[in-house]
């Protein structure tokens, strides 16, 4: 074997190993994203058990463009309000068989906290989670520190809208102009 062939063989062998190493690292990153199957009842119980000033619950799906577009704003909300006691709870409504797809999307968003994937059938999940919810995605709920549901909306909203809602709840209900609360919906 001539020297150029040996050198080329070593280059290709190394680059193949590098690609396999990258693939292994990507797989480890996907496995690091924890997606927990849960029923609507289990998720509602988890919301009630969180020790937080405010809990923002966002229900989304990988096949929903507005859901994916909203993620950077939700994560910005978490970065800005997390240190002040806000918790973000994400719930994917993709079929449980799509957990790998959900993990892949969450890894692409650098999610480093556990999230949920619904285990109920659609109608049961929607009806148990909130009877006012039509099933439209994304859907967002905000609870205060006592577990009282303060806000609910369907569809994507801009960051400023979500920021105003969280700020109002964290300020103990002192609303800025245009903010409203949904009373008497308690989890605790």
Image (spheres, grey):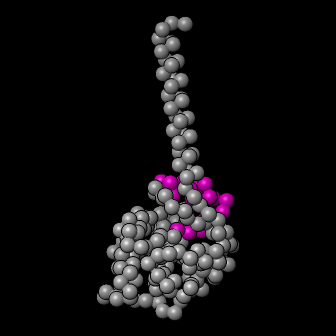
Q: Residue at x 52, y 68 (%)?
A: 90
Quadrant of the rendered image containing residue 166:
bottom left
Q: Residue furthest left?
A: 177
Q: Main secondary structure of the magenta part?
A: helix
Q: Which residues are magenta?
A: 90-108
Q: Is residue 128 above or below residue 81?
A: below
Task: Point out the image quarter for the N terminus.
Answer: top right
Res. 96 visible in picture: yes
Q: Residue at x 44, y 78 (%)?
A: 53
Give the mark count.
0
Q: Residue furthest front?
A: 51
Viewer-side residue, 85 vs 62: 85
Looking at the picture, how far across and down is residue 17, in whole percent?
Answer: 54, 30
Q: Is residue 95 above or below residue 139?
A: above
Quadrant of the rendered image containing residue 44:
bottom right
Q: Residue at x 51, y 83 (%)?
A: 147
Residue 79 in magenta? no
State left or right for residue 50 relative to residue 161: right
Q: Is residue 106 above or below residue 155?
A: above
Q: Residue at x 56, y 46 (%)?
A: 28
Quadrant of the rendered image containing residue 167:
bottom left
Residue 91 in magenta? yes
């Amino acid at each position: 074997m001539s020297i150029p062939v040996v050198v080329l063989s070593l280059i290709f062998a190394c680059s193949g190993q590098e690609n396999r190493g990258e693939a292994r690292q990507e797989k480890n990153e996907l496995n690091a994203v924890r997606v927990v199957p849960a029923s609507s009842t289990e998720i509602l119980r988890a919301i009630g058990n969180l020790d937080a000033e405010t809990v923002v619950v966002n229900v989304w799906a990988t096949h929903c463009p507005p859901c994916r577009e909203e993620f950077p704003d939700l994560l910005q909300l978490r970065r800005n309000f997390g240190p002040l006691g806000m918790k973000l709870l994400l719930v994917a409504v993709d079929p449980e068989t799509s957990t790998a797809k959900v993990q892949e999307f969450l890894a692409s968003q650098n999610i480093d906290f556990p999230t949920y994937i619904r285990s109920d059938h659609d109608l049961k999940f929607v009806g148990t989670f909130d009877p006012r919810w039509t099933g439209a995605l994304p859907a967002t709920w905000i609870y205060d520190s006592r577990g009282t549901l303060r806000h609910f909306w369907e569809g994507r909203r801009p960051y400023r809208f979500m920021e105003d809602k969280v700020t109002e709840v964290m300020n103990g209900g002192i609303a800025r102009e245009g903010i409203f609360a949904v009373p008497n919906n308690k989890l605790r």
